[in-house]
Image (spheres, rainbow, N blue to C red):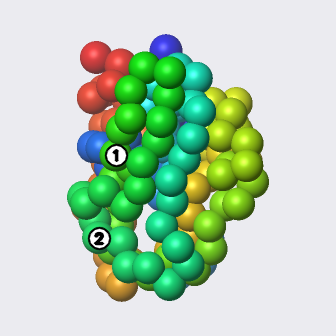
Amino acid sequence: MADVRDDRKYHEGHGWIVMEDESIGRFGISDFAQEELEEVLMVVLPKVGATVTQGVPMGEIESLKVISDLVAPATGEVVEVNEAVKKDPALVNNTPYEAGWLVKVKLADPSQVDGLLDAAAYSAQTNG
């Protein structure tokens, strides 16, 4: 059963967001998503300054099995990219909620986070 953390919100596209302050959110993919992908080989992320839109692909993640879109859980401007994950994509598999985070975004509308799934709802969606 996949690890689902209570301290963040989830997008149905299997991305998560945890708020670092009132306007900055850190994005990543869920433990469920990394398990489904299996071995992550490459991550393509947006550049700092790029605008990402909730529910719209912001990059790609490539595994042995498939190339998948990385869907933004909220709208805003990318303020930091996790360079470590670009160099070592296995971080996404090993620690999807810690070192395997993808980008930090200054949210255009922080209230968008309220409309995302909480841990219980996401767990019900993914674990049946």
Q: Pointer 2: what residue? A: 53
Question: On the rendered structure, is 23 left or right of 115?
Answer: right
The crowd level at tag 2 (other Cα within 10 Å; few <14, some 14-19, many 20+) is: some
Residue 57 placement (x, y as % from top left): 30, 56
Instruction: Please provide percent x and percent y for residue 72.
Output: 36, 60
Which percent across, then down, holds residue 112?
A: 29, 70
Q: Compared with residue 31, is residue 44 higher up or lower down, i.e. above or below?
A: below
Quarter the C terminus occupies: top left
Other-residue count near label 1 (Cα within 10 Å), few / some / many at <14 / 14–19 / ≥20 = some
Residue 7 visible in image? no
Instruction: Please tell me which residue lies in front, 94 or 25.
Output: 94
Horizontal relation, residue 110 to residue 31: left or right: left
Does dot 2 land on a helix, a strand or a loop?
loop
Q: Amino acid at mark 1?
A: Asp
Along the viewing direction, whichever of 12 and 69 lies nearer the viewer:
69
For image coordinates 27% across by 43% down, the residue present is 12
Left or right of residue 89: residue 63: left
Q: Which residue is mark 1?
A: 69
- Label 2 is placed on what type of residue? Thr
Quadrant for residue 40, please give it: top right
Secondary structure beneath label 1:
strand
51 w.r.t. 11: above or below:
below
